[in-house]
Image (cartoon, helix red, strand yellow):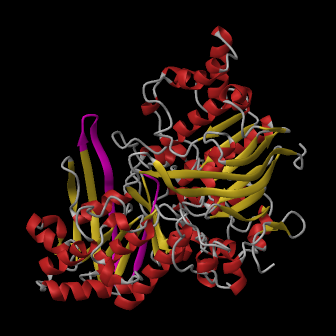
Amino acid sequence: MEKLLEIKNLETSFYTHAGEVKAVRGVSFHLDKGEALGIVGESGSGKSITMMSLMRLLSDNGKIKKGELIFDGRDLAKLSEEEMQNIRGNEIGMIFQDPMTSLNPVLTIGDQLTEPLIKHRKMTKQQAFERAVKMMTLVGIPSPESRMKQYPHEFSGGMRQRVMIAMSLVCEPKLIIADEPTTALDVTIQAQILELMKDLKEKINASIILITHDLGVVADVCNRINVMYGGMIVETGSTKDIFYNPKHPYTWGLLKSIPNPNEEERERLIPIDGQPPDLIKPPVGCPFAPRCEYAMKICMTENLPVFEVGENHKAACWLNHQDAPKVEPPVGRRNL
Amino acid sequence: MDKNKALIEIKNLKKYFPIKKGLLKKTVANVKAVDDVSFTINKGETLGLVGESGCGKTTTGRTIIKLYQPTSGQIIYGGKDIAKLSEKEMAPYRRKMQMIFQDPYASLDARMTVGDIIGEAIDIHKLMTGKERTERIQYLLDRVGLNSEHANRYPHEFSGGQRQRIGIARALAVQPEFIVCDEPISALDVSIQAQVINMLEDLQNDMGLTYLFVAHDLSMVKHISNRIGVMYLGKMVELCESNELYKKPLHPYTQALLSAIPVPDPEQAAARQRIVLEGEIPSPIDPPPGCRFKGRCRYAKPICSQQEPVFKDLGGGHFVACHLY
């Protein structure tokens, strides 16, 4: 498989009055062409900031301290703002969480959809209009010609998210980054959007990075999953590895805290006690150790190594060391 | 606990919001948020209420505890119709019925200490004063897993999950019998959701509380509810015991809604067939005649446009409003 994106040792911090918030602390991963990668984790785990760093869309007090962002052969971390503008929306499309606030309320949908085509692809207004109408049809918006003249407030939430997807696709990007694309939507609309994304992946062979906290959504759409916690990737593997053979206690915790869809009698949920770490003073060693029931002495003192636990399956947890005590994973969702 | 004894009976409840226009504020139309809904909430049970946004589930919850004045219909609480009671006559019922809100950031007054937020309801109902009041607040904080020293802090010092605990302590302060939980976990992270859900279950067991649990996360609703009601465009379309609903959904809308739940299991997710609903929920201002779901229904027949289906019991307390049955 050909690599489309490779992020190497990314570190991103925010400088606030309270101190330096180390939001991303050494993240490395890659994405193959045509692949759908899921990034899961709680709020504050660094999943969105990793992607914002990649797009170079950090707020003024945020800074990429270290790392390479190799996209299609170029290091995005080294590009100028002007060069980045040529990549955003053109080679990398983004779908944001909130379709209510990420569209411009004073421009028609048509203006917003054709802008990238006129800017990046140097199309005439007429060409851009025709292409935009085609995209609107592709994402399933009825009567697209007349909808082009309307403003965002005239669209429902689900329709706006379709417009966002159409907008991210209009320049045929190589990579689509979707940050919680369905969180604000109802389940029925969510199902429509997820089916649409899977369908489009096949049709235009784009790669997708899907950021979400909903394990059901990644199980449905993604081939591979990164689990993030405290600014680090704590486990990465194929979707089946993560769900059926997880190797990190945080992943176990995530899987245990959602209700079993097949439960007959009410089974008690097992929450992860405690709170996520304060990234102004991140703990030494494993960020999850203070909440981990299997934590050992070494977890709080030593730098965390990443263990290969299978083919393309890695976990940053000392339990996978050969000298560690053998622990039976408590996740009984499926026994393979 | 006798779970078959009714605590609240809702009969033909309607809540319309008028749309007013012009200088004289003449009512030109009504948003029929809740339109003729009848069901029973049993003592000690958790009744889940699900549906898409705009279906009227939140309005139903708020109307039952009379945060909204119902347009018509009866709300029979412990044998007495409270729908038309005055604010003064409502006072003793206000104490019995509490609410936990969706947004733990917006629902706590940022200028009040946690102790005052919890104590306010105790003061309003003149339940306790002085040392007894302080002790009660400390007990409640402890009950929801916070420290008694947290009483002197302000809401912004707490995380989302902790704030939701404060919201729960506030609801418990007046020793209610019935709590409307309006999307209490949708703003929280997965690992924190489980903490709050477990706590709600424990409190229910210990205090014999009755919950109306309004949410759109269907897997969590299934987990916590004894029975579930499905709403569509201001109407209740199906109501039954929760396992039964997931195993044998009868209404075509329920079937589509359940098939849309993302399954956290890649093989199950790949294997199952989704019923993707076309179109969107129609406007509640002028709902279509007959069955309100017919425009999106796979099984729609001519009768569905002519006659409104009756919400009837098909046996074993499985209610459905559909011409197929």
Residue in front for this viewpoint, A34 or A214: A214
User: Residue at 49% across / 42% down in the picture?
Assistant: B160
Q: Is residue B311 magenta?
A: no
**Res B301 seen here:** no
Most frequent secondary structure within the magenta stretch: strand
Q: Is residue A124 left or right of residue A3?
A: left
- Quadrant in which residue B157 is drawn: top left
Quadrant of residue A180 within the rendered picture: bottom left
Q: A105 or A18, which lies in front?
A: A105
For this view, does A27 lie left or right of residue B267? Answer: left
- Relative placement, left or right, of A108 versus B129 is left
Q: Is residue A115 visible?
A: yes
- Counting from the top left corner in percent of width and height, residue B308 is at 72, 72
Instruction: Please provide the residue range marked out in magenta.
Output: A15-43
Which is more toward the observer, B323 or A309? B323
Residue A119 percent location from the top left of the image? 12, 77
